[in-house]
Image (cartoon, helix red, strand yellow):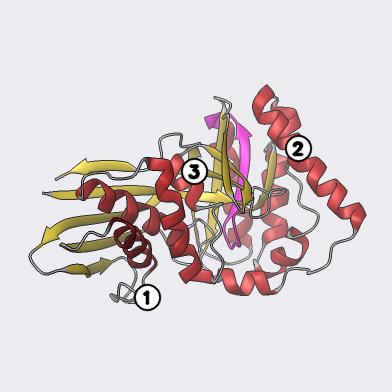
Amino acid sequence: MSVSVFAPATVANVACGFDALGFAIHEPGDEVIVRKSGTPGLRITKITGDGGRLPLSTEKNTAGVSALALLSETGYTGGIEMEIHKKMPLGSGLGSSSASSVAAVVAVNELIGSPFERGELLRFAMEGERAACGVAHADNVGPSLLGGFVLIRSYAPLDVVQLPVPEELWCSVIHPHVEILTEDARNVLRRRIRLEDAVVQWSNLGGLIAGLYERNYQLIGRSLNDIIFEPTRSLLIPGFDMIKQAAMQTGALGCSISGSGPSVFALSRGEAKAAEVAAAMQTALNKAGLESETYVSSLNRQGPVVRIL
């Protein structure tokens, strides 16, 4: 028996929710396939779509690290072979490492008889994030694993809240063909924040969450405002100001950086508007002389897709 799991890309931070908010989209994402083996231990036998950049060593690969954390707790001593198929760009700001980690723990858990409930897998997937960037944050792995819109209320202890998703809320994402490492994007962040800025930021966070519960699209739009991190991180993204201006002029509710960038996301009301916004964002980026991909998606409430092969 083999188990295939596709885990979706995610948009983290969501403007005003640094390290606390994230949501899943339907594409892109990563696939992990696992099967039992006669050789004890976990082995990564194949990686595709990474251009040869990712390590086969389980202790150095985020999917491997996450799966090893799970297996260590169960005491499972059998052999498992793992394939990783990267179906999204590395360093994109769309949770590439998270999608692999989530797909790995869901697949391995299914293969060995599902000793853990879905939500219990989060702490193992977070270990992959620790290996990737030094911080075990959950704003990517949370929504990739659980689907929908997720708030990380606390890390100690871990407290994850799933938020409602208005039916007409759609996302447009543009991924410029540049790479920004999460580690580098964190190094440009301000270490001290003015009280006045903090008040604005947490007020926007509260407004966004209230807008989701009330299905108030105007309130959602007014709240998608990051005055603390976007001003510095946006300097790393070529054409960011033009992209954001194009999205807002086309009627997006709001627009900001996806995760640590360089991808930029916009939320809109309805599929047609989201497609229009994506086209406008791409036109703006073309003027900056950069190639890109765009994705238009409703918010993904399902999370990982499991197939028994």
Q: Is residue 152 left or right of residue 47?
A: right
Disc 1 on helix, strand or loop? loop
Residue at 36% over, 62% down: 69
Residue 247 picture location, percent across and down: 67, 45
Disc number placed over residue 24 in the picture, else none: 3
Q: Earlier in the sequence, mark 2 or mark 3?
A: 3
Q: Which residues are magenta?
A: 258-272
Locate residue 191 relative to residue 239 in the image: left or right.
right
In the image, which is nearer the foreground, mark 2 or mark 3? 2
Q: Is residue 266 magenta?
A: yes
Q: Secondary structure at mark 3?
A: strand
- For the residues labelled 2 and 3, the Cα–Cα distance comes to 20 Å
Camera-near label (3 vs 1) is 1
| Residue lying furthest right | 196
Image height check: is 199 above or below 87? Answer: above
Could you tell which of marks 3 and 1 lies nearer the N-terminus?
3
> Mark 1 — residue?
60
Mark 3, other Cα within 10 Å: few <14 / some 14–19 / many ≥20: many
Nearer the observer, 175 or 287: 175
Spatial CA span between label 3 and label 1:
25 Å
Looking at the rendered structure, the secondary structure element under dot 2 is helix
Q: Nearer the viewer, residue 296 or 83?
A: 83
Q: Amino acid at mark 1?
A: Lys
Percent from the top left, x then y, of residue 239? 67, 63
The span from disc 2 to disc 1 (Cα, nearest Å) is 38 Å
**Residue at 70% of width from left, 42% of height from top?**
254
- Say few, some or many: other residues with alpha carbon within 10 Å of mark 2 (under 14 / 14 to 19 / 20 or more): some
Determine which residue is flagged by label 2.
Answer: 206
